[in-house]
Image: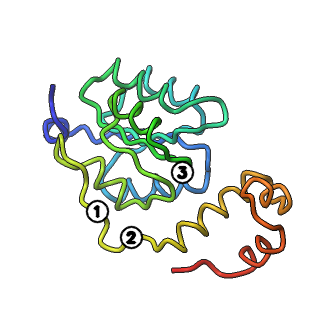
């Protein structure tokens, strides 16, 4: 099976990014284009599958949970069409079971959101059989917590009471956290 370097040697730098968070999708697409990839994007499993069927890319970054299904379907389709493709799974809901499933289906790495473009690039271009180097300046635990709270808040339609219920947190505590700036 050809490795990532063989794929790059052929000059195929096509990358498919599938994520239903439009702002994240746009930011990551711009960042990857600046790193030399030819980027195609999709916001749904169906659109991702259509892109894979039309022209299977050499690389893919796929969110696990999408509005119309599971991103693992896109990884499966990509691996069937193009076994040498390198795929990275992103999710805000990381757990061991989904990580194992993603890797068994051919993902080369599994990153928790919010992952930055450097982390994604490192995972995509890591030598085969090796994980990317850990980030030099990882997010602090406070920042990871804040990002998670913000994501759940957005998914709950910016409803404080529903967000507090889902996070098992007092509503006023959540309001204080939301009123503060993001930690570094």
Q: Secondary structure at mark 2?
A: loop
Residue at x 66%, y 36% (from the top left corner): 67
Q: Position of residue 34 (x, y in %)?
A: 36, 59
Q: Which residue is mark 1?
A: 134
Q: Which mark is residue 183?
A: none
Asked whether, in this view, residue 80 is left or right of residue 98, the answer is left
Q: Residues within 10 Å of mark 1 (few under 14, many from 20)?
A: few
* Nearer-N-terminus badge (3/2): 3
Q: Which residue is mark 3?
A: 25
Q: Quadrant of residue 60?
A: top left
Asked whether, in this view, residue 167 is left or right of residue 162, the answer is left
Q: Which residue is mark 2?
A: 138
Query: What is the distance, in whole Å, between disc 1 and disc 3 at their CAs?
Result: 23 Å
Asked whether, in this view, residue 67 is left or right of residue 123, the answer is right
Disc 1 to disc 2: CB gap under 8 Å: yes
Residue at x 31%, y 66% (from the top left corner): 135
Residue at x 56%, y 30% (from the top left corner): 70
**Along the line of sight, the residue nearer the viewer: 57 or 177:** 177
């Amino acid at each position: 099976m050809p490795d990532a370097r063989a794929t790059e040697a052929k000059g195929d730098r096509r990358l498919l990014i599938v994520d239903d968070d439009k702002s994240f999708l746009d930011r990551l697409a711009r960042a990857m284009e600046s790193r030399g990839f030819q980027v195609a994007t999709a916001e749904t499993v169906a659109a991702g599958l259509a892109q894979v069927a039309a022209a299977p890319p050499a690389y893919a970054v796929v969110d696990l949970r999408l509005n119309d299904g599971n991103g693992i379907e896109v990884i499966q389709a990509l691996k069937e069409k193009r076994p040498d493709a390198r795929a990275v799974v992103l999710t805000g809901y990381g757990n061991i079971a989904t990580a194992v499933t993603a890797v068994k289906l051919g993902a080369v790495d599994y990153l928790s959101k919010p992952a930055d473009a450097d982390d994604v690039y490192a995972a995509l271009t890591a030598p085969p059989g090796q994980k990317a180097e850990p980030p030099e300046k990882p997010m602090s635990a406070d920042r990871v917590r804040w990002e998670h709270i913000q994501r759940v808040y957005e998914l709950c339609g910016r409803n404080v009471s529903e967000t507090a219920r889902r996070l098992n947190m007092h509503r006023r505590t959540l309001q204080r956290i939301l009123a503060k700036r993001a930690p570094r």
